Image (tube, rainbow, N blue to C red):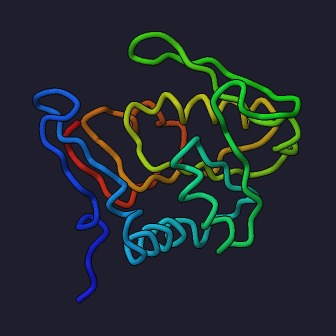
Amino acid sequence: MKKKLEEYVITIPDFPEPGIMFRDVTGILQDAEGLKLAVDQLCEAVEDLDFDVIVGAESRGFIFGAPMAYKLGKPFILARKKGKLPRETVEVEYALEYGTAVMEMHKDAIKPGQKALIVDDLLATGGTMKAIARMVESLGGEVVKMCFVIELAGLKGREALKDYDVASCIVYEGK
């Protein structure tokens, strides 16, 4: 019998602090069947979706988004932390729990009117995804869906992304 995707996720109690159940996605990556299952489920979530490009969030969004792009025959766009891209970029600053961060994308990555699917491994608070969506939209693109391997429902990221279509392979109720 085939394993479910959830069976590949390693849960570490009390990490990084007491009361937190850390959901480690590397268990999926360390097993060829787990990785295949994750990519297949993400692709199934968008099989009837009309979109032009896949945008992956640094860094684990690259791991899941690139094989999706390959399998679906779509271009893959990088959304990276500031200072990592070599050409002219657009950027957006967003709030973190303690401070701010900046994400960038090449200025020519999204063409006006293109429909974008954004992919990442984890939906927590939704801050990074909102920042990436703002970059896509600033370039004239439209975010048509956001897909995640894991969603931590207790952190209310889906509520923060209420203006977008969100899909997750696995949803954990806690934080």
In the image, 118 versus 11, the foreground residue is 11
Give residue 130's position: percent from left, percent from top: 56, 31
In the image, 56 versus 49, the foreground residue is 56
- Residue that sits furthest to the bottom in the current view: 1
x 82%, y 44%: residue: 110
Above or below, 1 relative to 57: below
x 72%, y 44%: residue: 142
Q: Quadrant of the C terminus?
A: top left
x 26%, y 78%: residue: 3
- Residue that sits furthest to the top in the current view: 99
All told, the count of numbered labels is 0
- The reply, left or right, for residue 159 in relation to residue 131 is left
Q: Quadrant of the N terminus?
A: bottom left
- The reply, left or right, for residue 123 in relation to residue 68 is left
In the image, 53 versus 141, the foreground residue is 53
Give residue 66's position: percent from left, percent from top: 64, 60
x 19%, y 40%: residue: 174
Above or below, 56 relative to 20: below
